[in-house]
Amino acid sequence: SCSRAKDVTMPAKLPVNFFSTRSPVIDLFRGQLDYADQLRQDSEIVLYFFYAPWCGQSIAAREEIERVARRLSDQVLFVAVNCWWNQGKCRKQKHFFYFPVIHLYHRSFGPIEYKGPMSAVYIEKFVRRVMTPLLYISSRSKLLDFLSNYEPGVVGFFEFNASPQPPGYLTFFTSALHSLKKDYLGTIRFGVVTDKRVAEEISLVHSGSVYLHRHANTSLIYPKDVMNFTAENIYKWALENREMLIRWLRPHGGKSLLLNNELKKGPALLIFIPYNPLAEIHPLLDEITKVALEYHKCNKSQAAEADLQHLGDSDSPAFDSSVTDAHLKFSETFPIAKYPCCNTVVLPQWHSISRTHNVCELCVNQTLGVKPNKVHVPHCNFLDIEAALDSFYLQEHTFFQVISNTIECSNFLSFYSPFSYYTACCRTVNRHFLSFISSEKTIFQTPKVAFSSHGKKDNTQFSIPHIEDRNCFIPDLNISSTNITGLSCRTNKTLNLYLLDSNLFWIYAERLGASRSTHLKEFAAIVDLKEEVHYVLDQNQSLVGPALENFIKNFSVLYSPLKRHLVDDPSVHFHEEHVVTEVTTNTFHKTVFLSAKNVLLLYYAQWCGFCASLNHIFIQLARLLPPDSFTVARIDVTRNDLPWEFMTDRLPTILLFPHQRKEQSVKFPEDFSVNLPNLLKFILHHSSSSSSEPCTKECLHKESVLQQGHISHLEREIQKLRSEISALHQAHDQLEAQLFEARREEQRLQQQKHTLEKQHKTLQIHSEQLQATYDQKNQELLEMAEKLQELADASENLLKENALLRILVASRGGKLQSKDEIKEPLQSEQTLSEDNDISLSTATAASEEKRIDNIDAIETEHSTGNRTE
Amino acid sequence: AAMQRFLGPLLCLWALRLPAGTGAAARGLDVASYRERVRAMFYHAYEHYLESAFPYDELRPLTCDGQDTWGSFSLTLIDALDTLLILGNVSEFQRVVNVLQEGVDFDIDVNASVFETNIRVVGGLLSAHLLSRKAGVEVEAGWPCSGPLLRMAEEAARKLLPAFQTPTGMPYGTVNLLHGVNPGETPVTCTAGIGTFIVEFATLSHLTGDPVFEDVARKALKALWKNRSDIGLVGNHIDVITAKWVAQDAGIGAGVDSYFEYLVKGAILLQDKELMSMFLEYNKAIKNYTKFDDWYLWVQMYKGTVSMPVFQSLEAYWPGLQSLIGDVDNAMRTFLNYYTVWKQFGGLPEFYNIPQGYTVDKREGYPLRPELIESAMYLYRATRDPTLLELGRDAVESIEKISKVDCGFATIKDLRDHRLDNRMESFFLAETVKYLYLLFDPDNFIHNDGSDFDVVVTPYGECVLNAGGYIFNTEAHPIDPAALHCCRKRREEQWEVEDLMREFYSRKKTKKFTLKRPPDHGQEEDAKDPKDASSEKAGERRNSKKSSHSLLSCPSQSFNSKLAVLGQVFLDNT
């Protein structure tokens, strides 16, 4: 019966409802994909939620989807499909590597996969984007709103006149959907203008033209002549040419190199703000955008300045049809200033400029025909800077004004390349330096103030009107504090700006040292992966524009006043009663340097196996050493940053900071095994204080303190020995008890042996008796045998007699034969019938036996019973 | 001040404590509720085992009865014992200790796997012995160096010793508990079956004082080391008589896994550089030949050519092991790969074909193995990355939804359709549930970082115990490294420490002595203390090996590890 259970298996449980029946989400829990497709006909917008019932992420997302569905159920059809059940159509047709998968359809367009955060607000925002991929821009103010956003915007102009749909509109619409498909964060926004007058604001005159707005670089118009006007092309063009002054980082949770790739581009300013994608206004974000725009404004504003002048000279109106033509003509090789590269140059003493200034920041501003989608290189190529320096020295006359404590900037043309010009900003760095930093206004002046004519000359070679001059007219973006304007191109420490939603990614802020206690989840940090440092904006300041600007400026200046931020473990509280003192970043200095004790410090990490297995040794050591002259401490360096000079690259590391020369710490040699005797020897060797001093009163006092310590140590030892003795006693008692037990056992065994012996004896007697009876019986048997023999003899005699009698009878018989002839046949018949009876009965018995055997072995008892019967 | 704690009702209160994890809160994962769900899982399985299967080895959850699988030791009960304590159930722990003492007999005519008996029975009994004081069991005066559970563990281990009597010192795979190695027993043993003894056997030797266990375990390890290929890899199966490799697939998974694990854990437990240097050599070869895109494949042990591009469920322990030696970045990268497989199926198939992205024929099952969860627990200690809690969440949801039946939790026979099999392996309660619970209970005593400890007075002196740093054997039975020190090492060191302390207090008087010390620490040690054999050896080793850093150390984490959470990985700067 056992063998069968081994093969028992059970099919998976039948699928059940995943969403409640009252939910606005239609739950196709049997994976009816065909039905799901049918449902799509009924609604303009459909959201499919493909799930697996066992999947934790699906379960977590269920609630969020339901929340979105409740808000949008009148406009969007929500369909959940169990795509795991192996009998269902969905499982058979689709092959997903993860769950849940969310697909959206806008009529027949789709699927658009949603890959953003599994949070209701983000999903809703995305669904809304799918519902209305194009924003209708009805007025000038709306256009300005649309364009002032930090995320790139694409505007199409379509005149809805006679025909129901102007040509190209559908393509543009599809392109907007297409962009959602590719760029699930929806960074590129699509808008449509139908009013000719509004369109003119961005110099669009022909219905069907498409415009990509850029803040720091020239805006572009879709080159219809060069590229086919297809949905995919428009999107690709926008993606390639968009400008990312400030970017959202939204790690999707799976394995990704996002931060690796972004942070390796150079120092990054990460700004954490709580973000609700559904909110109408984002004041904080607007403020940050302003800062970002200012920061990146450099090239454009130079260009803008030049353009304005040019336009003024020629007296021509800004927007006419030639503008677009010009754009189209140069769409492939449009002169867009590459991000410049800058280097700081310290001027040699002999140089004439050095009388007034000694440090210059030299930037190379190339205006070659660069494709707009080129990635910028943050560092200057050596040759560029060499060339710039040469040109710079020849232009030194520009700096002959003798004004100290200010910065002067100048642009000058390269002597090697007609398409490059350089910007040099020089100043004096001296004892007044600190005052420089505090008075920001004097440090940075916008380049446009000090532009020399060389820059202008350069630009006139490409006298093309730049449309985004308009920027300057947008009131929101007007410059209030101009001092970081264009800073990104004047420094060799250019920052990339990133936004993170602190509702989702606060953990990164915590990792960088954001306080865990704040309710306001706002935080800013500059991370420099290459230098392995990060700086944090003081969390007591609220995150507003000026604070951010200061932060950026302080980072950018030559001798940055920012201090490397050291992350501290806030969960550690100082426990007086802890044998081993737990040190953190904040308590490091106090515990190690300010205390008047020898400090033995263990660097450890909780995860490191080699550290954790030493815990007991350090506890023992701390209990041994006199607490008034020794501190045994440790620091978890995973959670506590230390100044560079105290960092260590291996764990565990043991350092001793001797009492009188804390600065001369010694390291426990790594090749020795860490055990109590070795540690004690190490301490003994290095902690010995200056001994040659003559024994004064003080020394005597010390001596007595030491002896006191020794006495208390010995007392402790005695205490220990006492407890050891008591433990020994206990063990002794235990042993005694066991011994007693054993003795009793032995006794019991002895008794048992006795009884057994007795039993043995009786058994022996018994066996003797049996032997006797056996003999007796044997005797009797022999006698019996004899008697039988006698009987046999007697019977033999009788047989003989019998035989004689037979002969006698036979002889007599012959005589009587004739007389008995009639009687004989009757007798023989009788004997025959008797024989038959016997054989019949044996046959039936045999057959019965067989039948019983057949039934079961268990019933053998019965059958033997039958047989005996 | 010493923290001499007597745990009893205290332990039960721990469960009520709120989670410390802050990262999880950001992603809305309720750690406490998941912890309670894991607890409920444990009792659902455990109570049905007691009810329907005890005293058999395992519960059969579909038929609601029991069967003997690895012997006849009430295996599930032994294996689940320390999980009871980790869940805080002191009274049941005490009851089971009594049941085992009376009920389990190793004098039985049973052919048992040497490997499985060691890791499950010996390991389970050892950890139960070491934890019994914490669980409020009244221990005898000689504890932790003596005790009934220790004697049982020793008895079980002695039954395994005959298997080690081979010309190579590598053990047979199977032994009869009553008669020793059966005549005609196959001499082919898998690598893990040879190299997975040092943790239990060294613990036994240190606690009991009988060196035989540690000696045989070391001899077997050295035999494997000697027989590695020229490119530094070991195969899957070897003939223990002739030392010829029978299966020459080299990888980190089935058949080899716990050999590497025990080299590291043995090195940590015994502070043994030799074991660590062996592992580091293997690690180099493994990285060179088997690692592709953070996956580890199977290669031919002599040529290094890829033989199977599969990921095995058993390999998922590797990230956890890496985190123990400080290779956290690589560990996390590999872990994230493995996690995608879980997301695809709701479990890890025994074999997963990496290029095809699907299961391998006949290897689609998931017997509720713990390895990925184990790695998540170790990595969570190191990174506090909420992604790891998400794996825990996924595991709880999957196991509850897929494999929970009326009588327990059933092995998933096929991950493609989630058909169930009539088995619940004992490691489900010993490991899977334990690691899950520990993942969701960052304040568990097992995670003690050394801020708490117990002082125990033994007849041999005073010991500091339970100071954290528990080493889990490959069946998730924790061993306290301090206990190993307590029974033998401490006694050896005692008098030396005493002398040094005396010197400590009198150093002002005997200034000459301290001043005379030569500046070099090693020389001074040898000169001053010739009787101290161990330090001499250390000096020798130091001279022979001029490594830049100690083998028994971890690299500290890089700057970018601060941001390496929520799936973000960083490439090496080199």
Image (cartoon, coloured by chain):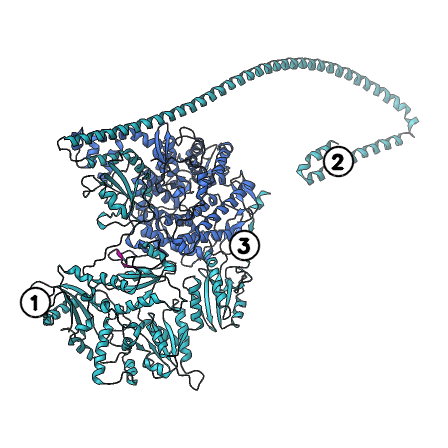
Which quadrant would residue B448 be assigned to in this image? top left
> With A603 as the anchor, is B298 left or right in this view?
right
Mark 2–mark 1 Cα distance, whole angstroms, equals 140 Å
Q: Amino acid at mark 1?
A: Ser
> Is residue B574 visible in the rendered structure shown here?
no
Q: Amino acid at mark 3?
A: Ala
Q: Amino acid at mark 2?
A: Ala
Q: Which mark is residue A12?
A: 3
Which chain is disc 3 placed on?
Answer: A
Q: Which residue is mark 2?
A: A845
Image quadrant holding the N terminus of chain B, namely top left
**Which of labels 2 and 1 is toward the front?**
1
Badges 1 and 3, same chain: yes
Which quadrant would residue B192 be assigned to in this image? top left
Q: Which chain is cyan?
A: A
Q: Which residue is mark 1?
A: A352
Q: Position of residue A432 (x, y in %)?
A: 14, 60
Image quadrant holding the C terminus of chain B, namely bottom left
Q: Report the front residue among B495 and B65.
A: B495
